[in-house]
Structures are given as structure tokens and as C-alpha cells.
Image (cartoon, grey):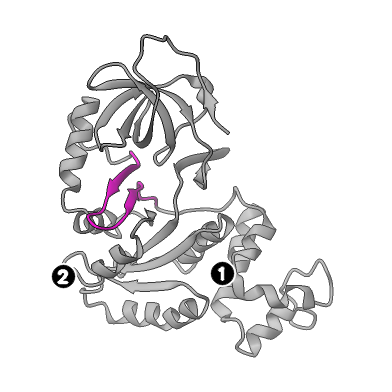
């Protein structure tokens, strides 16, 4: 499905492109030759986001007009006050970036994995700053590594400083579009600058094209990784909540729970009473990690507040 707007026929020929940055009422469009154009768009197209595959018409060598938005394969959204705000589209891989400093809250990783599961996206867990010496933090995260890998998640320890693990991450993203997500301070920008050596130059080019004159850290942008795929850098947030998802979606995000859900004594089981709950029994038998069941209850309690 394609949303269109009616335009003056004096514009150039309609052509495909991709939206790589969004500045209020202005978007930056990349054509198939890799050239960037500052474009306007009409409100009846709805909300456009980084990653959108669009149709547009040039006005001159620098500007144009977006005339249509192609149907999205996926849309990444996050809660925004009383609604949800889309931030990126057509993503294949959600890259959850954690770090030894600041150390994530116990539920941080599971929040992003639930989001990925709800969108049927591949999720990669990246532990940044692995060159730093925080023995207790390393021990805590590595104790959980095997559990997540058994669930099918790729777990990478990387360092923006030494380059460790960067090549493997780039290899995973060949012919794919990934999005970096994580709390502020985990080093997403540093990771981006290693993956995309000319990221600063690209940012400056975008700012010049938009006439902003500076790097706007609140803008979600798409970059091309040399000999790999694309990566979208999203602004860091202190706490990612899941209030835009329902209880069943959160439950489904814990993949190892699924074989036991229908085995509880009561259909409306709250998964708290060990006498009647199959999840509690599975946790006791070591089939479910206790911290994952604890995280589930923490997240469900947040939904009802």
C-alpha cells in the first residue's frame, strides 16, 4: 500500500529513495545513487520516520518533495507520554547495547528483547566497553550470557576502543539494516564511529544540508557500514518501558516460558503461586532462570500501574 499526495507536474520524475534523517518538517532523502536531498512532505502522508522507503520528486539539485511512503516491513516505536512514537522503520536487526558502565538494571535487556520478539525481529546483545576492568559487572553479565545464548540470542562482547568484536558485528549486518538501542552512556556513538569511520562526516553533511550547523543528538539517523549493511543510530534513553504492549505480548517475549504456559492449573494463572503454576515449577527444576521469571513479574506490574 502506498500513500500519495497530488503535486505540481512541473516537478522532476518520480523516483524511489530512502529517508535517512528527520528534522521536524524536513526530511533527508537518499536517492539510489547515494545523493542526499532536503525534502518537504505533506501531512496527509502520516508520520515519516528514518528508514522509510519512499517515492519522491526533485525540485532542484538539493531539494525535493516526498510524494508517497511504501508499506513498512517493520516499525520501531517507543512510548511517548500518552501514546507511542515511531522512531524507525524497515529494520531487520535490533542491536541491544549494554555496557559495564553504566551497569544496566536487571530488566533492561529483557525490555528490548520483548520489543524485538513482538516485531519478529532478530535481536543481538552487544556488551560494549569490554576492555574496561569491572570484575563484578563482568561476572554478573557473563553469568547470564549462556542463558540468553541457549535461547538463540547472539551475544557479543565488543570494545569501541580496541575494536574487539566489531568485525563480527559488521559481518552479521551484511545486507541488513540494524538499529542501535540502549540507555544513555553505553557508548552507542563510539560504537557507531568504529562501524562507520566517516559517520562524523556524514553527520556534518546532513547538518549542512539541513542548515542546522551542528550535530543534533536527538535525531535518529541511518548510516551505511562499509562492505556491510546499514545501521540506524537512535537517541539514548534512561529507561525503556513497555506500556504500549499488552500482557500477552510481554509474556510471549519470554520464549522459554511458552512450553509451560498452558500447563498451569488455572487458565488465569498469575504465575506467582508455586502450588498451581507450571512456570514456578519449571523455575524450581532449572528449566527457567529464576531471574527471568522475576523480570517478567516486574514488567507485568509496570503495565498495570
Q: Quadrant of residue 58?
A: top left
| Crowding near the residue tagged with mark 2, few <14, some 14–19, many ≥20 C-alpha atoms within 10 Å | few
**In-image side of 192 versus 139 (left or right):** left
**In-image side of 61 versus 144 (left or right):** left
Q: What residue is drawn where x is 21% and y is 73%?
A: 132
Is residue 261 shown above or below 49? below
Is residue 74 shown above or below 298? above
Residue stretch in magenta: 219-237
Q: Nearer the viewer, residue 75 or 284?
A: 75
For mark 1, what is the residue? 295
**In-image side of 12 versus 92 (left or right):** left
Judged by depth in the image, the label closer to the viewer, 1 or 2, is: 2
Distance from label 1 to label 2 (Cα)?
Answer: 33 Å
Residue 108, image x, y percentages: 46, 63
Would you say residue 220 sits in the magenta stretch? Answer: yes
Q: Quadrant of residue 298?
A: bottom right
Q: Residue furthest front?
A: 13
Residue 187, image x, y percentages: 26, 59
Residue contact between numbered discs 1 and 2, judged by CB atoms under 8 Å: no
Q: Nearer the viewer, residue 26 or 225?
A: 225
Q: What residue is drawn where x is 42% and y is 21%?
A: 41
Task: Identify the mark at residue 162; answer none if there is no mark.
Answer: 2
Residue 65, image x, y percentages: 37, 20
Is residue 25 shown above or below 291? above
* Residue 286 appears in view: yes
* Residue 212 appears in view: no
Amino acid at each position: 500500500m502506498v500513500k500519495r499526495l497530488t503535486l505540481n507536474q512541473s516537478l522532476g520524475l518520480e523516483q524511489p529513495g530512502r529517508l535517512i534523517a528527520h528534522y521536524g518538517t524536513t526530511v533527508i532523502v537518499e536517492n539510489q545513487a547515494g545523493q542526499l536531498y532536503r525534502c518537504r512532505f505533506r501531512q496527509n502522508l502520516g508520520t515519516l520516520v528514518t528508514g522509510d522507503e519512499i517515492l519522491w520528486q526533485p525540485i532542484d539539485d538539493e531539494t525535493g518533495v516526498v510524494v508517497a511512503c511504501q508499506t513498512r516491513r517493520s516499525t520501531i516505536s517507543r512510548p511517548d507520554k500518552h501514546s507511542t512514537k515511531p522512531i524507525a522503520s524497515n529494520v531487520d536487526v535490533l542491536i541491544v547495547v549494554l555496557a559495564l558502565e553504566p551497569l544496566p538494571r536487571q530488566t533492561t535487556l529483557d525490555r528490548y528483547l520483548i520489543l524485538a520478539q513482538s516485531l519478529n525481529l532478530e535481536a543481538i546483545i552487544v556488551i560494549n566497553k569490554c576492555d574496561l576492568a569491572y570484575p563484578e559487572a563482568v561476572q554478573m553479565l557473563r553469568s547470564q550470557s549462556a542463558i540468553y545464548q541457549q535461547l538463540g540470542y547472539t551475544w557479543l562482547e565488543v570494545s569501541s576502543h580496541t575494536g574487539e568484536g566489531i568485525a563480527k558485528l559488521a559481518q552479521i549486518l551484511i545486507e541488513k539494516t540494524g538499529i542501535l538501542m540502549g540507555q544513555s552512556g553505553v557508548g552507542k556513538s563510539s560504537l557507531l564511529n568504529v562501524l562507520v569511520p566517516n559517520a562524523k562526516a556524514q553527520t556534518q553533511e546532513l547538518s549542512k544540508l539541513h542548515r542546522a550547523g551542528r550535530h543534533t543528538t536527538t535525531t535518529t539517523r541511518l548510516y551505511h557500514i562499509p562492505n556491510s549493511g546499514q545501521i540506524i543510530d537512535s537517541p539514548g534513553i534512561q529507561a525503556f518501558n513497555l506500556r504500549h504492549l499488552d500482557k500477552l505480548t510481554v509474556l510471549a517475549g519470554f520464549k522459554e516460558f511458552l512450553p509451560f504456559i498452558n500447563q498451569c492449573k488455572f487458565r488465569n494463572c498469575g504465575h506467582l503461586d508455586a502450588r498451581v503454576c507450571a512456570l514456578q515449577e519449571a523455575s524450581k527444576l532449572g528449566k527457567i532462570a529464576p531471574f527471568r521469571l522475576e523480570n517478567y513479574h516486574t514488567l507485568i506490574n509496570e503495565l498495570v500501574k
